[in-house]
């Protein structure tokens, strides 16, 4: 068994270029050896030749790189529509693959990607959900799922610290278009939070969303969202996000039968009730009484390795069968929430899960065909890493 993995990157845009710089030299993730880079934009290749050290082969065609025999594993860092296309191409060539978020634009294409992954159990398929490495959210999940505090009653996530200027949206003609990107804040900034939502709370049965398109920017997609979710056990959730608040908030609150848990900023708060509320209320005789409790100091391991942690775990899974931070097949869940929110807003009514994937695709393509970016078929089905670089944060 080799102790190093030959590693390639497809797409040297914002995220791909960051990985290329960090992987060069082998110190960031020692078990990954950067051997190949691909981007159809000659300027990006020129940049990489100048800024990325090491014995690296350069390609302008992704399939040529994947067929070169120079790599064992590959990161897919192209715009969202093409994530499944290149993940599948890697798998069909026996190459381990790490996919940037989101898994794709619509669940139908991601389901096809997951079906291909099932044919290659020997390959390690990872998803870049680096927020799962954050000790706050790992501990929050542990507390919610421990059973100690009973059921979830409601959850609220106000995640509006995604401010983006008009200049950001003007930086590429694909950006914030239905044909080029497939959506706005839900698909670009929030895949991590939607993944954490389902990772901690599970999937709802019904979603209703209210969106403003171009509320704060000259764009055609959503930059302001409020979504309401219902669960089988009766609890509810509200998810609010925007790229228009200059100084926004990141507060994730979960109210349970026996505790209130809040992740805000860099802190995790736990207010632990002395009894479950439904037990206390049976004997309470005070008209305005409330369940007594106390603030409990939450201990975490303090670790938050982010992208580096995801790649180290992926390398460990390839070489030694160690657990991933997030399996690639899991990417469809958060995307389902995003697609359901979009579909609800498109139709002006709640939508049920499982999602009607064909209906969502039809509604999305209507908007792609009439949107600002022309020739949506080209945007959807061809390699756009040439003109548009890599993934966005």
Image (cartoon, rainbow, N blue to C red):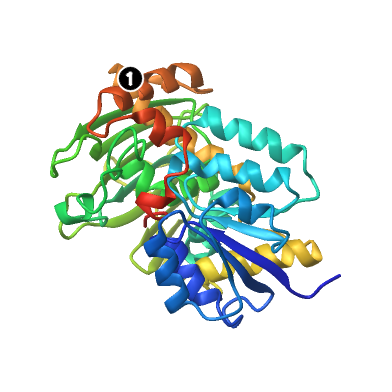
Q: Position of residue 194 (x, y in %)?
A: 44, 44
**Residue 295 picture quarter:** bottom left
- Mark 1 packing: few (<14 Cα in 10 Å), some, or many (20+)? few
Q: Could you tell me which residue is drawn at 70 percent across and 40 percent down?
A: 117
Give the tally of numbered discs: 1
Tell me where residue 143 appears, x and y as whole percent: 55, 56
In the picture, measured across the screen, residue 248 lies left or right of residue 87, that is left
Is 242 rendered above or below residue 109? below
Q: Please tell me which residue is depicted at 27% across the width and 31% down the height of the picture.
A: 374
- Between 365 and 360, the one lying in front of the other is 365
217 relative to 322, above or below = above
Quadrant for the C terminus in the image = bottom left
Q: Which residue is mark 1?
A: 366
Residue 228 appears in the picture as rendered: yes
Determine which quarter of the picture holds residue 240: top left
Q: Is residue 353 toward the left or the right of residue 294 in the image? A: right
């Amino acid at each position: 068994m080799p102790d190093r993995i030959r590693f390639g990157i497809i797409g040297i845009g914002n995220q791909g270029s960051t990985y290329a710089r960090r992987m060069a030299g082998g110190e960031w993730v020692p078990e990954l050896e950067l051997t190949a880079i691909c981007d159809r934009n000659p300027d990006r290749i020129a940049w990489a030749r100048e800024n990325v050290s090491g014995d690296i082969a350069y390609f302008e065609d992704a399939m040529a790189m994947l067929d070169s025999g120079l790599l064992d594993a590959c990161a897919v860092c192209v715009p969202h529509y093409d994530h499944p296309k290149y993940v599948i191409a890697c798998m069909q060539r026996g190459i381990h693959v790490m996919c940037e978020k989101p898994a794709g634009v619509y669940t139908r294409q991601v389901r096809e990607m997951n079906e291909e992954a099932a044919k290659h159990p020997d390959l390690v398929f990872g998803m870049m959900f680096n927020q799962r490495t954050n000790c706050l959210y790992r501990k929050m999940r542990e507390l919610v799922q421990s059973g100690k505090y009973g059921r979830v009653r409601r959850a609220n996530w106000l995640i509006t610290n995604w401010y983006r200027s008009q200049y950001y949206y003007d930086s590429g003609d694909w950006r914030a278009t239905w044909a080029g990107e497939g959506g706005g804040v839900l698909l670009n900034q929030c895949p991590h939070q939607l993944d954490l939502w389902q990772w901690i709370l599970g999937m709802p049965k019904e979603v209703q969303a209210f969106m403003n398109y171009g509320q704060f920017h000259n764009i055609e997609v959503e930059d302001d969202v409020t979504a309401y979710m219902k669960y089988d056990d009766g609890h509810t959730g509200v998810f609010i996000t925007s790229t228009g608040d200059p100084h926004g908030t990141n507060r994730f609150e979960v109210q349970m039968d026996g505790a209130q848990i809040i992740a805000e900023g860099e802190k995790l708060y736990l207010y632990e009730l002395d009894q479950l509320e439904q037990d206390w209320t049976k004997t309470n005789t005070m008209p305005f009484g409330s369940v007594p409790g106390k603030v409990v100091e939450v201990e975490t391991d303090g670790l938050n390795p982010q992208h580096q942690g995801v790649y180290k775990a992926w390398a460990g899974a390839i070489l030694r069968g160690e657990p991933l931070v997030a399996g690639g097949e899991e990417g469809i869940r958060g995307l389902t929430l995003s697609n359901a929110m979009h579909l609800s807003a498109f139709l002006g009514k709640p939508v049920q899960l499982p999602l009607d994937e064909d209906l969502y695709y039809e509604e999305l393509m209507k908007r792609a065909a009439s949107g600002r970016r022309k020739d949506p078929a080209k945007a959807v089905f061809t390699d756009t890493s040439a003109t548009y670089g890599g993934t966005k944060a």
